[in-house]
Image (cartoon, rainbow, N blue to C red):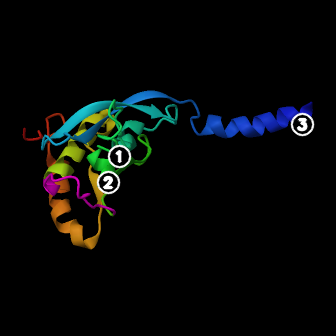
Amino acid sequence: MQRVISISLLIGIPHLLLGGESSLTTTYQPLDGLRSGAIIITQVACHDWYSHSGQPTAISLISAPNVPPTNNPKEATENLNLASACGFRFGCGDIDATRELTFDATDFEIPKRFDHPREQIVRACLECLRRCLPEKLLNTPVMLKASESEKEWLSKIVSEFNTHDRRKVFFIPPS
């Protein structure tokens, strides 16, 4: 009996330490407008497996794939989230300790099926980040990680974002 209890504790403790209760949460994602030529910044529901971790998981979920349900299985079956499809990742350190925000664009590549200008995609992704930021991180600068070939133009946009008043809209997609 004691062995069963010990095994149960060993299995259960990591779930407690890692915030093992899941729940639905919301984030913002820059979605392709399905042949409309527009980027749509929208709030989406996500299944958050680490909802009790104390981390602002809405930030990392900006980059989660988004394949919407459809009644036509031959259409709209690909990931519509431009952040995810283009290889962007957002991260956040411990809010109370380091207060670090990262924008990882090292794997940036626009899939051929999208024809949005690269600057608009980046700005839309940063607008999603702005909308997800908790109050404690509103003034935290974003640290850029990018390949040398992309760093120059990306750092200009990230620098503009870092000096922008985050209580105001950073990017409105053209219609």
91 above or below 133? below
- Specify the farthest residue to the bottom: 148
The residue nearer to you, when weighing 156 against 87, is 87
Mark positioned earlier in the residue sequence (1 or 2): 1
Mark positioned earlier in the residue sequence (2 or 3): 3
Q: Which residue: 35% across, 40% down?
A: 66
Secondary structure under tag 1 reads helix
Q: Position of residue 109 (x, y in %)?
A: 27, 61
Point out the frontmost of discs 2 and 3: 2
Mark positioned earlier in the residue sequence (3 or 1): 3
Which residue bears the numbered disc 2? 88
Secondary structure under tag 2 reads loop
Q: Position of residue 128 (x, y in %)?
A: 25, 40
Circles 1 and 2: CB distance less than 8 Å?
A: yes
115 above or below 95? below
Give amino acid for label 3.
Answer: Arg
Q: Which residue: 24% across, 33% down?
A: 42
Residue 129 picture quarter: top left
> What is the spatial separation of the Cα atoms under label 2 and label 3, in whole angstroms?
46 Å
> What is the spatial separation of the Cα atoms under label 3 and label 1, in whole angstroms?
42 Å
For the question of whether residue 102 can be seen, the reply is: no
Q: Position of residue 62 (x, y in %)?
A: 33, 42
Which residue bears the numbered disc 1? 63
> What is the spatial separation of the Cα atoms under label 1 and label 2, in whole angstroms?
6 Å
Give amino acid for label 1.
Answer: Ser
The magenta-colored residue range is 107-119
Q: Pick the quarter of the image with the N terminus.
A: top right
Q: Position of residue 5 (x, y in %)?
A: 84, 32
Q: Residue 120 magenta-drawn? A: no
Which residue bears the numbered disc 3? 3
Give amino acid for label 2.
Answer: Phe
